[in-house]
Amino acid sequence: MEDAPRQRRPRRATGMTRLRAAQPRTADLIHRELFNDIVAMRRKPNDPLPERDLLAHFGVSRTPLREALLRLADEGLVIIYPQVGTFVARIPVQALCESIMIRRALELVMIEEAVPRIDGNFMAALDGNLLSMEAAGTADDLDAFDQLDGEFHRIIAEVSGRHTIMAMIDAVRAQIDRYRLTTLPQAGRLDRVIEEHRAIRDGLAARDVAAATSSMNLHIGQMLTEVQRLDTTNPDFFLDDRKETS
């Protein structure tokens, strides 16, 4: 009778193996940098992404670069034309509207969850954020203002304790953030955002769920109304795909 085959014992990861596993892959690093540049509008819609320039910039072979670009294409941030080239994608209006709808619904849930957990530390963080936003607006520092805008919503997410919901919002933010950055230079825009944030803050300070959710609904909902009108100073940045999906 033949001996039963030996069952192989799983190999234990060595220190070097664990280190390699923890290090980001080259394609991931390329994706992250290009993703951040596109979402922050450092690379704008319709900008070309020449392969030769990117290879020189990242100092890599074609394989990880193309893998990163394919991921960005799947995310709707670049468009690849075979035999022509790769370009930063325009902002698709239909996808943008749906992303705003998703974000609005989730932000309202987080307001409801945050109110019972409000304490002095939370209000101090929110008030400090608003003071910094006002200073950034006065200095016309759009980059700082944009970061503080995101931080305002993240402070609410933290006190709500709903980190999965915040992760879901982050997953749909890319097109929203691109749109928002096109609007910040508009006259009076920074003051309006601060005013809307302050209304949300006041509702939270009063532990008034109805007032806080109403203010958040207005804050996010106005953006949806603007997009649906497609009233923008940069029409070439957008792809009005609403007829294609109706």
Image (cartoon, helix red, strand yellow):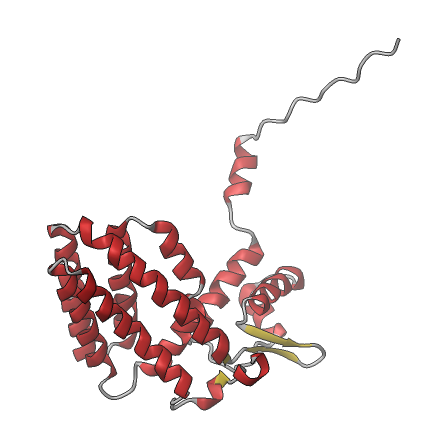
Residue at coordinates 48% horizontally, 89% vertically from top-left?
236
Along the line of sight, which residue is nearer the eye, 59 or 124?
A: 124
- The percent coordinates of residue 203 (x first, y second) are 15, 64
Total labels drawn: 0
Query: 185 left or right of 79?
Result: left
Along the line of sight, which residue is nearer the eye, 173 or 114?
A: 114
Which of the 4 quarters of the picture holds residue 228? bottom left
Decide: is 95 above or below 168: below
Residue 132 seen anywhere in this rendered image of the structure: no
Split into 4 quadrants, where in the image is the C terminus? bottom right
Residue at coordinates 16% horizontally, 70% vertically from top-left?
199
Residue 89 seen anywhere in this rendered image of the structure: yes
Decide: is 222 above or below 18: below
Residue at coordinates 36% horizontally, 56% vertically from top-left?
166
Along the line of sight, which residue is nearer the eye, 211 or 175?
A: 211
- The percent coordinates of residue 129 (x first, y second) are 18, 64
Decide: is 86 above or below 129: below
Residue at coordinates 45% horizontally, 90% vertically from top-left?
235
Which of the 4 quarters of the picture holds residue 132? bottom left
- The percent coordinates of residue 12 (x first, y second) are 58, 27
Which of the 4 quarters of the picture holds residue 61? bottom right
Query: 237 left or right of 156?
Result: right
Along the line of sight, which residue is nearer the eye, 2 or 87?
A: 2
- The percent coordinates of residue 76 (x first, y second) are 54, 71
